[in-house]
Image (cartoon, helix red, strand yellow):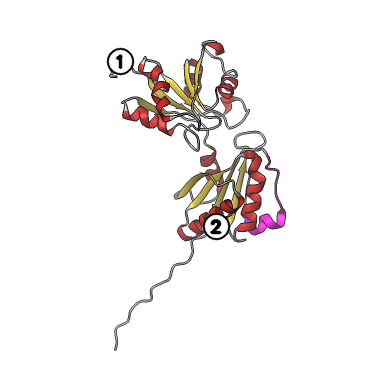
Amino acid sequence: MTVPPARVGRLLLLPVPLGDGAPGTVLPAATLHALTTLTHFVAESARSARRFLAKLPLETTLQSLDIQELNEHTPRDAYDRLLAPVRDGHDLGLVSEAGCPVVADPGAGLVALAHRTGIRVVPMVGPSAPLLAVMASGLGGQSFRFLGYLPADETQRTSAIRRIERDARDSGCTQVFIETPYRNTAMWESLVKTCDESTLLVVAVDLTLETEEIFAKSVGAWRRDGPVALHRRPAVFILGAEPAPTARRLPRHSSP
């Protein structure tokens, strides 16, 4: 159905804090303004979205907000319905559970449908845990790969770790990934057991919070020093390695 452009709203991609810190310490004024003035949202969990929005000086009541859910159980044929407020002239905010929406989060399909149907998509500024971790890692930010979540199965996770460590060494590309907080310790153990002792392992925990900690050291040093408290704390893991040496071609000399 074609709607006159004057009545079409926008899809705003709205970052939220990475933890329970004060929103004003990590969100810029424009993002806070959008969050406090919108009346229509799409969130992975309506309950957690309401809990976050309750901390803000809303221009309307919390009960009057229309918050629809989009998660791994949402069928694709529901996306068009989720965009209905935009076609009615309202701006619609897509929010994550933490950090930037769509990054290792549901929502890409909704954004793609907005593009296909001529709806303006507006990414707004806010904290991104993977980018903050890369910034603080000491590893190359010129070439990095964000892998999202590695497999939960131990055997598959070990295979994935070996593959990405090899890729880091062969290409020099920094490898960034995350884990469900309650599996952080298992992830750390797999990394330290599997990787070469010269591989650099960065662990960034509780980014932007008062409890923030960032550790960057070789796997060999991790084995010597032991683990840190990671259980149920949001964390980003980064692997980096010096690229494998390439064969040097010797100059050809002509025969005398």
Q: Quadrant of residue 48?
A: top right
Judge from the rendering whether residue 56 lies leftward or rightward of residue 253; answer left or right. right
Indicate which disc, 1 or 2, sits on the residue closer to the N terminus: 1
Crowding near the residue tagged with mark 2, few <14, some 14–19, many ≥20 C-alpha atoms within 10 Å = some
Q: Hey, which residue is sitting farthest bottom in the picture?
A: 256
Please determine whether, in this image, residue 90 is positioned above or below residue 177.
above
Crowding near the residue tagged with mark 1, few <14, some 14–19, many ≥20 C-alpha atoms within 10 Å = few
Residue 7: x and y, percent?
Answer: 33, 14
Residue 143: x and y, percent?
Answer: 45, 50
Count of marks placed on residues: 2
| Secondary structure of residue under mark 2 | helix
The quarter of the rendered structure image containing the C terminus is bottom left
Magenta stretch? 218-231
104, 173: nearer the viewer: 104
Please determine whether, in this image, residue 48 is positioned above or below residue 108.
above
29, 107: nearer the viewer: 107
- Find residue 130 and name its label: none
| Secondary structure of residue under mark 1 | helix
Magenta-colored stretch includes residue 223? yes
Q: Nearer the viewer, mark 1 or mark 2?
A: 2
Q: Are marks 1 and 2 in contact (CB under 8 Å)?
A: no
Magenta-colored stretch includes residue 115? no
Residue 57: x and y, percent?
Answer: 56, 15
Q: Amino acid at mark 2?
A: Arg
Residue on which disc 1 sits: 6
3D distance between C-alphas at marks 1 and 2: 53 Å
The quarter of the rendered structure image containing the N terminus is top left
Residue at image point 38% right, 73% down: 249
Q: Amino acid at mark 1?
A: Ala
Residue 205: x and y, percent?
Answer: 63, 41
Residue on which disc 2 sits: 162
